[in-house]
Amino acid sequence: MKVPQALVDTNVLVYRVDPRDLEKQEIATDLLRRAIADRAIAFPHQALLEFVAATTRFRPEIGGPLLPRGEVLREVENLMLLAPVLYPNAQVVRTALRGTAVFGLSWFDAHLWAYAEVYGLPEIWSEDFQHGRRYGQVRVVDPFHELTGGEVHEPGATYG
């Protein structure tokens, strides 16, 4: 069995279904399609939970959620069939605590990094960290780096 090489953050999953930014949607779709075919990725449990919350919450600018709840739940079921899902344990939580202290990461970003660090995945695909930076043994790749000019995108939590 091939060991995944990258952990996928929520923003990549959301952009794949978000029609408001067609360039990011295309990048996310192509990236995930190739990575799933190559068995190169894993999803942290956290990203799946955040994906449900982010895509089903009401968005005033479009008059509703990005996707209907039933479609989102089917999407999560499909993602769980297509790539391994990593679940938190005590070591992940302890590592996340260390990530907040050592790297100054927010709790959610530290938790995401901790999954990759603990499970031995060398990359995180996310726009919420500094592109190319190493955190411990993990390197961050921002798939949208070329579009944003290197600007780190750190939105507030949309799942609460």
Image (cartoon, helix red, strand yellow):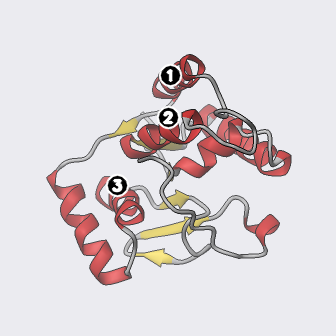
Looking at the rendering, in which quadrant would you find the N terminus?
top left
What crowding class fits label 3: few (fewer than 14 Cα within 10 Å), some (14-19), or many (20 or more)?
Answer: many
Residue occupying the point 81% across, 49% down: 21
- Would residue 88 appear left or right of 78 to someone viewing this image? left
Answer with the quarter of the image where residue 35 lies. Answer: top right
20, above or below 73, in the image? below
Residue occupying the point 42% across, 55% down: 121
3, above or below 137, in the image? above
Tag 2 residue: 52
Tag 1 residue: 73
Residue occupying the point 56% across, 24% down: 75
- Would residue 35 appear left or right of 46 to someone viewing this image? right
Mark 2: amino acid = Val
Task: Estimate the spatial distance between the alpha carbons at disc 3 and disc 2, rounded to whole Å.
Answer: 19 Å
Task: Estimate the spatial distance between the alpha carbons at disc 1 and disc 2, rounded to whole Å.
Answer: 7 Å
134, above or below 42, in the image? below
Q: Which mark is residue 25?
A: none
Task: Estimate the spatial distance between the alpha carbons at disc 1 and disc 3, rounded to whole Å.
Answer: 23 Å
Mark 1: amino acid = Leu
- Please state which of the two labelled residues, at mark 3 or mark 2, is closer to the viewer: 2
Mark 3: amino acid = Tyr
112, 36: nearer the viewer: 112
Tag 3 residue: 115
Say which element carries label 2.
helix
> Residue at the left extreme?
90
Say which element carries label 3.
helix
9, 2: nearer the viewer: 9
114, 64: nearer the viewer: 64
